[in-house]
Amino acid sequence: MTTEPHPSDPTEQNQPTALRTHLCGVLRPADVGKTVTVCGWVARRREHGEHLAFVDLRDHTGIVQCVIDHATDVRSEWVVAVTGTVRQRPEGTVNPGIGTGEVEIGDCTVEVLNEAEPPPFSVDDRDESDEPVRLKYRYVDLRRPRMQRNLRLRARVNAALRQSMDRQGFAEVETPLLWAPTPEGSREFSVPSRLHHGEFYALPQSPQLAKQLLMVGGFDRYFQIARCLRDEDLRADRQFEFMQLDMECSFASQDDVMAYVSEAVIDAAEAATGERPPPIARLTWAESRDRFGTDKPDLRFGMELVDLTDVFADTEVKAFSSPAVKAIVVPEGAAFPRKRLDDLTEQAKKAGAAGLAWFRVVPGTALDGPLARHLSEQEAVRVLALTEAEPGDLILAVSDEYATACAVLGTLRVAIGAPPVSEGPHRYVWVVDFPMFDGIGADGHPQAAHHPFTMPYPEDLPLLATDPLAVRSQAYDLVLNGWELGSGSVRIHRRAIQEQVFAALGIGPEQAEARFGFLLGAFRYGAPPHAGFAVGVDRLVAILAGEENIREVIAYPKTQSGADLLTGAPTPLPAAALAELGIRVVVPPSEGTR
């Protein structure tokens, strides 16, 4: 597999430098007869008789075949410059699998620019080396066509995002990496101060407060592709460091922000894929949970949740006597073996359900399963009618509290039906009208669902003190194929409302002043109404590249344990450096006894 220039990639046009006249992957029949110099890495060498050898030379645009003297000593991954004449390949030797497959470079002279030891793995997409080896030798791994393709796609996405935001009147402003701690729901990285012993900066989880202050400063429309850091456990779609398209605008509504972000994301998708996605659909948070069991719905497939609560309102079947009964239909799932059904039942229990009911739909549209004979005839008929299940299908049902039933079936729906990330189409959706709070914490106070700077709906403000869990926020998420790309909200711009929200969260006046005095103080000097959003660039690029893990679209990622195998980080600091920072390391007892 090779890397070919993308239609919008500048490598499609030649880029001569002092050492080369042409890039390897751009030579075509129109170049026949030209004397050229190409530079790159030796991808492969093949002997041809006693006098000639074929060398595939690779740079980031692709591979070109060079015909060299047999005696010329070049080996895998040596860096060379080849000068010769472009000519048509002989009849029968054309390689349609690569862009340069109709031509080769003949009459070659070779200059070795640098020799190389044999690499620890093949620089080839067919190589299945373990990820730790790839990350340890990342500089070799980056030569692979897959990594070249992914990171250059990322560059196109970033460029398209910048161009789109600039076209829409947003000014790019950089915000600090050394900032004050803020409670945005995630653990922060702390940076000790050398000049102020015992005091620390925090690396920003996001530029949230900084960009709100830019609105107070009159910038009207701000954006940046911002580096953010969170000290949270790593997973397929999360790293310590991540990049986001961050934006904020004044005198704007939720609909305005969603329109700006939609335009930028659609522009980026078009730059990456060559196709422009359709307008982005919209769901409310309640509708998304009711239909898909989650606020991050994957719209690429069906299996939507069906409400069976009314069917079992007067049931005598104890298993269905809970407040809510929800179900999904698995097309042709009746063929699942019993072990698969047992595994799904265990998965449902791990997700919080008391159990999982299942029914096979057999010919004659009858139900078969452990609970089927306990259903009344009317219940069985209504289950089939509401689910629209056909013979050969499988019905999975959860009876529990409404939120639990939805969440469990949402988990099973994705586990059973979600296509791989690499399979299209790309289905974007806005999810709106989130709850302001996400349950009650151990301290008895509600927990912010997004962050504490989100504006409630005006009509819900009285509920902050009496029924906070009923308060709706003017918050909105963008979801792509079941991945949350980002979140945003209309912000609180009045000090009195911000203090009400802080009070609901259990943040008293003194604590609020100590932690957010600079923001509350700014509200005294004319803060405009404003709203914003942030798009996760790593996740967007990963999906557009068809990758299951964002590590594959990041040049130097960490492992799941947070280690950097290339540099060895994290590492201890020398005693002198610790002393200068005024820090003494205390080893936990569990580590000291290892």
Image (spheres, helix red, strand yellow):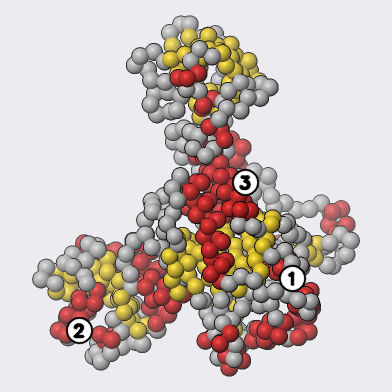
Q: Earlier in the sequence, mark 2 or mark 3?
A: 2
Furthest residue in direction bottom, as rendered:
466
Residue 343, image x, y percentages = 33, 66
* Discs 2, 1 touching: Cβ within 8 Å: no
Q: In the structure shown, which secondary structural element does the residue marked by tag 2 occupy?
A: helix
Amino acid beneath label 1: Val
Q: Which mark is residue 556?
A: 3
User: Under tag 3, what secondary structure?
Assistant: loop
Corner quadrant of residue 239: bottom right
Is 331 left, or right, of 567 in this rendering? left
Is 277 located above or below residue 95 in the figure? Answer: below
- The residue at which mark 1 appears reads as 216
Q: Residue at x 69, y 50 (%)?
A: 569
Residue 249: image quadrant is bottom right
Label 1: element kind:
helix
Tell me: residue 13, above or below residue 487.
Answer: above
Q: Which residue is mark 2?
A: 379
Q: Residue at x 22, y 62 (%)?
A: 332
Q: Can you see residue 539? A: no
Say which quadrant the N terminus sits in.
top left
**Res 256 seen here:** yes
Q: CA distance from mark 2 to mark 3?
A: 57 Å
